[in-house]
Image (cartoon, rainbow, N blue to C red):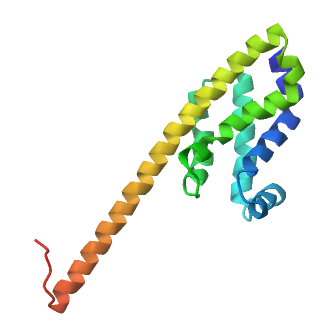
């Protein structure tokens, strides 16, 4: 029952989910992300638009949350480099729960609907945990890049000092 309703209400649920994701950004950016359809002018908005659909279809098709890694990674990479806390970066997954409950509230409160909702909610929670793992790996990569750049800068500075005849602590 719930799966059929999720398919039937797919456009409404996806539109609401995307709206909830975009609301996490300042108004000027969220408006741009929502309205600009050119992939090259708006890669962020287009990535969110496309990958929310892939994730939703995967949930309807019953894939394992791990099968969502590629889509989650595309979205998380964007959110990792933005000025968001870890919880804010992965919060967009929970927006799907909100969108579904807003659009299917009456259907979910039935006994059968509630059982099916609990299963879907569990899948969404697993997506959220996977998203956090991906976020942690992305942050680790960023940190490694920063450390590498700092070492390169230090080495360049030490080489310049050595060439100019200034004393350095290089050993």
| Residue 7 vs residue 89, the one in the foreground | 89
Report the residue that reaches farthest toward the bottom: 164
Residue 8 falls left or right of residue 140: right
Picture quadrant of residue 45: bottom right
Q: On screen, 88 above or below 97?
A: below
Image point 60% across, 24% down: which residue? Answer: 64
Report the residue that reaches farthest toward the top: 111
| Residue 25 vs residue 57, the one in the foreground | 25
Image point 25% across, 73% down: which residue? Answer: 155
Residue 25 falls left or right of residue 36: left
Q: Position of residue 119 (x, y in %)?
A: 69, 16
Image point 74% across, 24% down: which residue? Answer: 60
Quadrant of the image for the C terminus? bottom left
Q: Position of residue 55 (x, y in %)?
A: 69, 35
Residue 56 falls left or right of residue 133: right
Image point 86% across, 24% down: which residue? Answer: 105
Q: On screen, 162 above or below 141?
A: below
Picture quadrant of residue 104: top right
Residue 44 falls left or right of residue 17: left
Q: Position of residue 118 (x, y in %)?
A: 70, 17
Q: Position of residue 124 (x, y in %)?
A: 66, 28
Total number of numbered discs in the rendering: 0
Quadrant of the image for the N terminus? top right
């Amino acid at each position: 029952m719930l799966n059929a309703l999720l398919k039937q209400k797919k456009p409404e649920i996806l539109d609401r989910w995307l709206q909830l994701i975009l609301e996490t950004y300042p108004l000027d950016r969220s408006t741009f992300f929502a309205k600009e359809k050119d992939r090259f002018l708006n890669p962020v908005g287009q990535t969110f638009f496309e990958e929310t659909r892939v994730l939703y279809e995967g949930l309807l098709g019953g894939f394992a949350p791990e099968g969502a890694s590629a889509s989650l990674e595309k979205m998380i990479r964007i959110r990792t480099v933005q000025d968001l806390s870890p919880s804010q970066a992965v919060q967009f997954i929970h927006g799907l729960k909100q969108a579904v409950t807003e659009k299917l509230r009456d259907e979910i409160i039935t006994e059968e609907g509630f059982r099916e909702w609990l299963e879907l909610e569990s899948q969404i929670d697993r997506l959220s945990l996977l998203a956090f793992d991906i976020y942690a790996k992305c942050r680790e990569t960023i940190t490694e890049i920063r450390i590498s750049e700092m070492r390169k800068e230090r080495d360049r500075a030490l080489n310049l000092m050595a060439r100019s005849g200034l004393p350095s602590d290089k050993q």
